[in-house]
Amino acid sequence: MKSITIITGIPHERERVFAFLDVMAFHERFTDHMLRDWTTVGPARGVGARAFVTSVLGPKPDPIEIEVIDAVPGVRITERNVGAGGRRVAHGTYELEDLPPGGTRVSFTYEWKRAPLSERLLAPVARRIMRRAIGRALDRLADEIARADDVGGVAAAA
């Protein structure tokens, strides 16, 4: 299946955006419209941080395991997602770049590595659903970073 890339601008410095995204538990705040029942395990941040969630995007709830497999501070975070009983494996990668004056360009790419036949047959529909859900998550990201800053969330986690 072809990958999906969504790009947005966020009015926060790259280091602040990375610090927020680096904490796996913070992802619940901007993805809870599509991923529910979050349980985080392992380190709170960085490679090895994991979460067990339930996707509510498809026709039935789908347990998913998310694990950070690569992180370059201030630049990139890559997560491996395993769902559909192990039949779906995908990578989600956040890439960050500076935007003048002081904002951050966030690019998120979702790339299927393996998918069940049913999802491959419905690829255009699956991609459209994922594009909409990921776009909404990135739209919510800036507000959640600001909210975390207001309560000391990003600074406390850094």
Image (cartoon, helix red, strand yellow):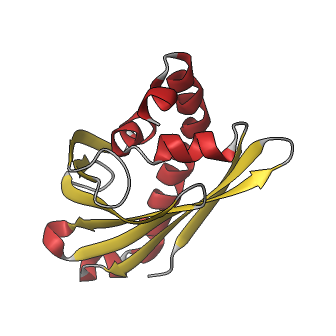
Residue 87, image quadrant: bottom left
Which residue is depicted at the point 62% across and 45% down?
15
Q: Residue 109 vs residue 156: left or right?
A: right
Task: Spot the residue most to the right.
Answer: 101
Q: How many marks?
A: 0
Is 31 or 2 nearer to us in this picture? 31
Which residue is depicted at the point 24% across and 40% down?
38
Compared with residue 103, is residue 90 higher up or lower down, i.e. above or below? below
Which residue is depicted at the point 20% across and 56% down?
62
Residue 16, image quadrant: top right
Is 145 or 8 nearer to us in this picture? 145
Is 103 or 157 nearer to us in this picture? 157
Q: Residue 90 vs residue 60: left or right?
A: right
Is 53 or 136 nearer to us in this picture? 53
Which residue is depicted at the point 49% across and 16% down?
151
Compared with residue 81, is residue 118 higher up or lower down, i.e. above or below? below
Estimate the x, y position of residue 19 in percent, counting from the top left. 52, 43
Task: Spot the residue most to the left.
Answer: 85
Estimate the x, y position of residue 77 in percent, counting from the top left. 48, 61
Estimate the x, y position of residue 69 in percent, counting from the top left. 35, 68
Q: Residue 142 vs residue 12: left or right?
A: left
Compared with residue 149, is residue 139 higher up or lower down, i.e. above or below? below
Compared with residue 69, is residue 155 higher up or lower down, i.e. above or below? above
Residue 116, image quadrant: bottom left
